[in-house]
Every structure is written in structure tokens, then in C-alpha cells.
Amino acid sequence: MSKEGVVCAEMCGHGVRLSPVARAHVRRRLRFALGRLAPRVRRVRVVFAQPAGRRRAVRECRMIVDLLRAGRVVIGHRAGRWGAAVAGAAGRLAAAVRRRLGRRRPPGTRRKGV
């Protein structure tokens, strides 16, 4: 991601093809989830899978974010629709990245009293 918040996500699917509209939806969700954290993000990968078996109606979206100097965050979400899987994974990803990065303050600044 760049400092402007433009998402450069690598997307792939295991047995799944994504339309250009679906790709745009994923980029938009990532922009909402990681927008202000963009300077700390090195790379984003999104993997789609539709597991075989009895629960064929389940769709899985896994998001992998490599952070600068903070490691990797991997989040997955399953749902009945692709849009719901992407939305759930993006929401969980935003919380996990914020948690990983912590609420660090610049040196020399203090929190104002309550």
C-alpha cells in the first residue's frame, strides 16, 4: 500500500474466479479497513477458497498482511456469500492490525488527563 491509501492487493483463488467487480469490492473493503494504516503496510494478499465436501455453500476469504517492522497478520472468515466473507475478513483484519501495531505515541508526547 502507498501513503495515499491506495490498496495494491495480490488476489488469488483456489478453484474460484473473481470478476473485475468483485476485485474492486475487495480493494474498497481493504481501503476502508487499512486506510490510515497504509504507511505501515508492506503487502496484502487475499486468498479465496470454496472448500469441497458437504458444506459446498461455504466460502472462505483469507487476508494476509505483511507489516513494516511488525510481522505478519493472517485472518480468515467463512460465510455463505463472497461479499459477506470479504466484509467479515476485512473487519477482523482491521482490528488485528491495530492490535498488532498497538497505540504507540511519538516519543515525548503524553496522553491528556481525563
Image (spheres, helix red, strand yellow):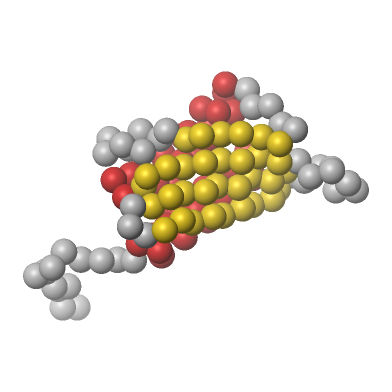
Residue at x 40%, y 63% (from the top left corner): 100
Residue at x 51%, y 34% (from the top left corner): 10
Q: Nearer the viewer, residue 91 or 43?
A: 43
Q: From what the image shows, is residue 7 above or below residue 18?
A: below
Q: Is residue 88 visible?
A: no
Residue 112 placement (x, y as % from top left):
14, 73
Q: Is residue 69 visible?
A: yes
Residue at x 49%, y 56% (from the top left corner): 73
Left/right of residue 85 with respect to residue 104 in the rendered view? right
* Image quarter of the N terminus: top left
Residue 74 placement (x, y as % from top left):
54, 55
Residue at x 79%, y 45% (from the top left corner): 51
Left/right of residue 31 with respect to residue 13 in the rendered view? left
The residue positioned farthest toward the top in the image shown: 20
Where residue 5 sits, quadrant-wise, is top left
Q: Nearer the viewer, residue 106 or 24?
A: 106
* Image quarter of the C terminus: bottom left
Q: From what the image shows, is residue 15 above or below residue 76?
A: above
The residue positioned farthest toward the right in the image shown: 54
Left/right of residue 22 with respect to residue 28 in the rendered view? right
Q: From what the image shows, is residue 51 above or below residue 105?
A: above
Residue 76 placement (x, y as % from top left):
61, 53
